[in-house]
Image: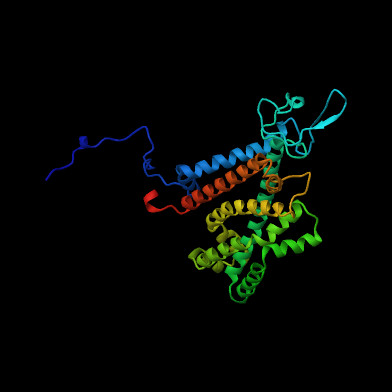
């Protein structure tokens, strides 16, 4: 039998051996970020959405024209001519009087620059979507967590209320609101607030029903913690993953809903613009000026695609499959 000798071992110096560098523990959100960034489709969606947001924020600021400005020139006789329905042309307009102007997306039938209006409309649509989703997240998450945590008669009453609200067609709610409210951003946001939080509440309730019987929740109850402390301090942090995923999928739904409301004439009013109002204006002229509808439709399609790719990426990153780990 071999007896170990003193020279068989060597002390390791110069590095900390208390932590295994190869298998060091990784934080939850760091792991989510790593899995998300490994998803090429999710990163592509993130880049697309980031580009649209950058253009929506800065393009109207650096543009030569405002979104409501009617572009006109005065000819040699002193007559004012408006740049109505000019086709996109980088080197200048098709009309000689506007040959020194550049309209990347052309002009609409009122003589306004479509480049500026498209990005201003994207800005308005994104603001409406983010504000509505943020408030919906607060309402839907709180509603679902309270319903799932208390259960019993409280849960029955709250769920029957959801069924009543969900059974009313969205257009009926919008039509009623249009009677008492002026058309504009306020009407669109209120419409989204009334109809879009139900899905969020169902997800929060399902997660709460799954988590509320865990040992750490029982420990908090034993130590005398209040119900709302347990809901928002113990249960909510452990349901944030599915909620974030739902938010990513709800944003394109909110943008599309805003576009639909503006398209049917109960959303943004002139001279303000949004993606939906621009699509509606382009649709009215699609047979004679088809170029007017292309920019807002492309922006809407990119936003829908980008946010859906981000949502898929978050869903996989928050619950990665074994083969992807």
| Viewer can see residue 325 | no
Work out which residue is located at the far left of the displayed protein and give it. Answer: 1
Is residue 281 left or right of 24 when viewed as pictured?
right
Q: Position of residue 142 (x, y in %)?
A: 63, 62
The residue closer to the viewer here, 137 or 88, is 88
Position of residue 321 measured from the top left corner of the image (x, y, whole percent): 41, 53
Q: In front here: 66 or 135?
A: 66
How many marks the image carries: the answer is 0
Classify 277 as above or below 64: below
Q: Residue 147: where, in percent of width, then height?
A: 61, 69
The answer to whether residue 83 is left or right of residue 132 is: right
Left or right for 149, reference 84: left
- Quarter-of-image position of residue 293: top right
Task: Residue 144 in the image: state x and y as whole percent.
Answer: 60, 65
The type of colouring in the image is rainbow
Furthest residue toward front: 288
Instruction: Tell which of 292 and 47 is nearer to you.
Output: 292
Residue displayed at 74% across by 54% down? 265
62 lies above or below 288: above
Q: Is residue 36 visible?
A: yes
Residue at the limit of the structure toward the bottom, as seen here? 153
Q: Nearer the viewer, residue 137 or 118?
A: 118
For image coordinates 64% across by 74% down, the residue present is: 157
């Amino acid at each position: 039998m071999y007896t170990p000798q003193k020279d068989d071992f060597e002390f390791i110096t110069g590095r900390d051996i208390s932590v295994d560098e190869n298998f060091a523990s990784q934080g939850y959100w760091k792991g989510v970020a790593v899995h998300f960034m490994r998803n090429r489709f999710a990163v592509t969606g993130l880049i697309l959405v980031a580009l649209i947001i950058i253009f929506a924020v800065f393009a109207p600021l650096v543009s030569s024209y405002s979104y409501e400005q009617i572009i006109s020139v005065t000819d040699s006789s002193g007559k004012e001519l408006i740049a109505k329905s000019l086709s996109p042309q980088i080197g200048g307009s098709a009309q000689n009087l506007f040959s020194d102007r550049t309209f990347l997306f052309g002009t609409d039938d009122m003589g306004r620059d479509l480049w500026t209006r498209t990005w201003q409309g994207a800005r308005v649509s994104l603001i409406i979507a983010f504000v509505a989703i943020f408030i919906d997240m607060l309402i839907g998450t709180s509603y679902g967590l309270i319903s799932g945590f208390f259960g019993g008669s409280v849960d029955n009453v709250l769920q029957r209320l959801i069924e009543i609200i969900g059974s009313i067609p969205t257009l009926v709610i919008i039509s009623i609101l249009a009677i008492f409210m002026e058309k504009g951003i306020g009407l669109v946001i209120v419409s989204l607030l009334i109809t879009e939080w139900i899905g969020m509440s169902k997800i929060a309730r399902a997660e709460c029903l799954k988590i509320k019987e865990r040992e750490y929740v029982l420990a908090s109850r034993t130590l005398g913690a209040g119900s709302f402390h347990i809901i928002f301090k113990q249960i909510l942090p452990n349901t944030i993953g599915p909620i974030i995923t739902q938010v990513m999928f709800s944003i394109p739904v909110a943008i599309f809903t805003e576009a639909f409301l503006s398209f049917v004439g109960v959303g943004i009013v002139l001279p303000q613009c949004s993606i939906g109002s621009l699509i509606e204006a382009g649709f009215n002229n699609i047979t004679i000026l088809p170029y007017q509808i292309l920019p807002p439709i492309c922006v809407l399609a990119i936003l829908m695609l980008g946010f859906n790719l981000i949502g898929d990426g978050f869903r996989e990153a928050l619950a990665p499959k074994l083969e992807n780990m």
